Image (cartoon, grey):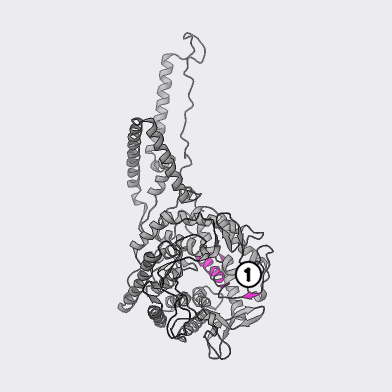
């Protein structure tokens, strides 16, 4: 973990032991404590030489400026050493030393001037100034939360490759990518105009919308969209969002939040924004929020609660979840973010909490090698034996694979858990329909429900991403599986009236890839199908994936775009859209980002350097072979 890189001498200057100079009243006394004038002179000479030597050492020894900054100007040293450019190197360190000494001189002159000014003021004016300064400091620390940003270890920032990408060579692809950027602009501008600071936008009624998932934390769309704005080079909008985060993003709320949703959207969004831009405010806010989530782990097993009051630290589970159980996809989707929190804060507790979850899971007997969706955090036993690669299960599997990839392929435990789970899913849940469509069913106490959720469609991309590391000769087989799932999910879109996929679709009673229940026919701007197209395009460069993505763009523009943004739809089989009037924050974080990357070159957020969290927030691979630089991610 990154540790403080400041001098161990911080706050401790060398102090000479002074010999007693005080002569006794009787000047002729022969007592050993009194000195003659010549002796005093010699001692004074030695003492002044010693002081000169100390100060000379500080100013002229190599790296003296760093020592000095550590001793006197702690925070400015941190600022000075934070490289924010992609090409920063140590070549300018000599220039840095000169600049630092000039800054010290300037600060010294400024302090003298201030002292002079103060001495000329009346006592009551000075008193008022002190009170005003105290109020200002209090207000600022309230905004920052309990832990001040300067308590974080110093980390030298290096931007990983591919934060922004080159224009595509092909003119049609370039045009399509520009169209997606225009869609992002419409979604963002509408949010800014009608719902700025709210969590989400109601695009039809043109006002803010707040989901109870975030308690009274505000600005979900702003934090979720930060990295998309940066990746699309919408820097003006990114700066406005950064400004809002700095001044208005507040976690000091007396409210219950979803630990999972706040982690993937807020913590994930802030971490990505930090790694892309190098702005310290994002690191500080991510760590502050991470600390507020830690009390969720205060259970007998260390399996976290689903809901947490950020002020009191009291947690509980969803009342509907199998006898007070925690949910697999919720407690299993913290790993990537918490490993990065440990790295950026120097606090190993974040990593320990998520590694403990694995210990609990590895001790348990898995029915047919499968992981049930429910686990009781008190007893450490499974709840109902329901298994799903869609809602309630999905991102747990994704995070096993991505934990291994993000660790620079050193997390062997995560790797083994992922490939074992995938084998159990293939054996027990993957099926082919009469007409040859591969789907992943749901398992309820040993019985299969032949239904696949829109959420499950992410699995095509996940299996493709993991195929390369598959054991034995399974790589080709897993790529085929991924392509088959992508095709099934495309069919779920193609078989609707509006060419947008339903929330869930079935394979029974002669029906294939069609929603048969009214409460499964809606589309809420979800990204999973497009996510799979993006991964399949990157790995195969088969042009059909870009074509399928473009079909989705046209359907979104035709049926979801309204004057005030983009809205979800209640029934994708109806002849005209009936709007649900919500522009989900993940539409900006995921759907539009994956579309943009689908029409970008492969060097834009390349997979060897970046791993996407389940909300499409890119996090850098943590390189294990670089020990000299704590934050080397290149």
Foreground: 182 or 105? Answer: 182
- Identify the residue under disc 1: 321
Q: Which residue occupies 56% across, 86% down? A: 507
Q: Classify 436 as above or below 443.
A: below
Q: Which residue occupies 36% across, 54% down? A: 89
Residue 423 seen in this snapshot: yes
Residue 630 seen in this snapshot: no
Answer few, some or many: residues within 10 Å of disc 1's Cα (few below 14, many 20 plus, some between 14 and 19): some
User: Helix or strand or loop: what does disc 1 sit on?
Assistant: loop
Q: Is residue 412 left or right of residue 565?
A: right
In the rendered structure, does residue 72 fall within the stretch colored magenta?
no
Question: As drawn, which residue projects farthest toward the left?
Answer: 171
Residue 30 spot, x, y in % from top left: 50, 10
Q: In this view, does 386 lie to the left or right of 272?
A: right
Residue range in magenta is 385-412
Residue 141 spot, x, y in % from top left: 46, 47
Q: In which quarter of the image is residue 321?
A: bottom right
Q: Classify 139 as above or below 167.
A: above
């Amino acid at each position: 973990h990154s540790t403080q890189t400041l001098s161990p001498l911080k706050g401790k200057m060398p102090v000479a032991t002074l010999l007693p100079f005080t002569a006794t009243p009787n000047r002729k006394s022969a007592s050993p404590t009194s000195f003659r004038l010549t002796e005093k002179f010699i001692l004074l000479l030695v003492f002044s030489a010693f002081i000169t030597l100390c100060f000379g050492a500080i100013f002229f020894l190599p790296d003296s400026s760093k020592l000095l900054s550590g001793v006197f100007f702690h925070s400015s040293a941190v600022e000075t050493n934070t490289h924010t450019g992609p090409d920063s190197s140590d070549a300018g360190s000599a220039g840095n030393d000169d600049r630092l000494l000039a800054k010290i001189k300037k600060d010294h002159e400024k302090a003298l001037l201030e002292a002079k000014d103060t001495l000329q003021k009346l006592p009551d004016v000075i008193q008022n100034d002190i009170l005003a300064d105290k109020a200002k400091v209090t207000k600022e620390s309230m905004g920052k939360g309990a832990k001040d940003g300067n308590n974080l270890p110093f980390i030298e920032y290096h931007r990983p490759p591919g934060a922004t990408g080159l224009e595509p060579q092909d003119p049609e692809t370039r045009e399509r990518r520009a169209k997606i950027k225009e869609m992002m602009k419409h979604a963002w501008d509408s949010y800014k105009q009608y719902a700025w600071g709210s969590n989400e936008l109601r695009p039809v009624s043109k006002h803010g919308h707040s989901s109870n998932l975030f308690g009274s934390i505000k600005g979900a769309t702003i934090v979720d969209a930060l990295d998309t704005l940066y990746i699309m080079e919408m820097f003006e909008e990114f700066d406005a969002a950064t400004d809002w985060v700095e001044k208005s993003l507040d976690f000091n709320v007396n409210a219950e939040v979803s630990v999972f949703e706040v982690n993937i959207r807020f913590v994930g969004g802030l971490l990505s924004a930090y790694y892309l831009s190098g702005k310290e405010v994002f690191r500080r806010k991510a760590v502050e929020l991470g600390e507020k989530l830690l009390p969720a782990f205060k259970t007998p097993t260390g399996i976290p609660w689903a809901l947490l009051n950020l002020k009191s630290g009291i947690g509980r589970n969803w009342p509907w979840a199998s006898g007070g159980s925690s949910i697999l996809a919720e407690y299993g989707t913290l790993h990537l973010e918490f490993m990065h929190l440990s790295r950026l804060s120097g606090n190993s507790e974040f990593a320990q909490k998520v590694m403990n979850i694995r210990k609990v899971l590895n001790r348990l007997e898995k029915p047919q090698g499968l992981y049930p969706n429910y686990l009781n955090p008190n007893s450490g036993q499974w709840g109902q034996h329901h298994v799903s690669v869609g809602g309630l299960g999905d991102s747990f599997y994704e995070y096993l694979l991505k934990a291994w990839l993000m660790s620079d392929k050193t997390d062997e435990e995560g790797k083994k858990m992922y490939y074992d789970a995938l084998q159990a899913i293939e054996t027990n849940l993957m099926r082919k329909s009469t007409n040859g469509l591969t789907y992943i069913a749901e398992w309820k106490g040993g019985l299969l429900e032949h239904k696949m959720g829109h959420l499950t469609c992410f699995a095509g991309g996940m299996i493709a991403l993991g195929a390369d590391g598959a054991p034995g000769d399974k790589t080709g087989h897993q790529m085929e599986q991924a392509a088959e799932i992508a095709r099934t999910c495309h069919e779920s879109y193609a078989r609707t009236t509006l060419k947008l996929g339903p929330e869930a679709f079935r394979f029974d009673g002669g029906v294939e890839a069609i929603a048969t229940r009214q409460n499964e026919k809606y589309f809420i701007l979800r990204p999973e199908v497009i996510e799979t197209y993006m991964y399949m395009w990157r790995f195969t460069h088969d042009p059909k994936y870009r074509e399928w993505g473009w079909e989705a763009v046209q359907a979104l523009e035709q049926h979801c775009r309204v004057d005030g943004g983009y809205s979800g739809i209640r029934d994708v089989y109806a002849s005209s859209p009936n709007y649900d009037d919500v522009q989900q924050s993940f539409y900006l974080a995921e759907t539009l980002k994956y579309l943009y990357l689908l029409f970008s070159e492969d060097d834009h957020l390349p997979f060897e350097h970046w791993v996407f969290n389940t909300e499409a927030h890119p996090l850098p691979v943590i390189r294990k072979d670089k020990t000299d630089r704590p934050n080397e991610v290149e």
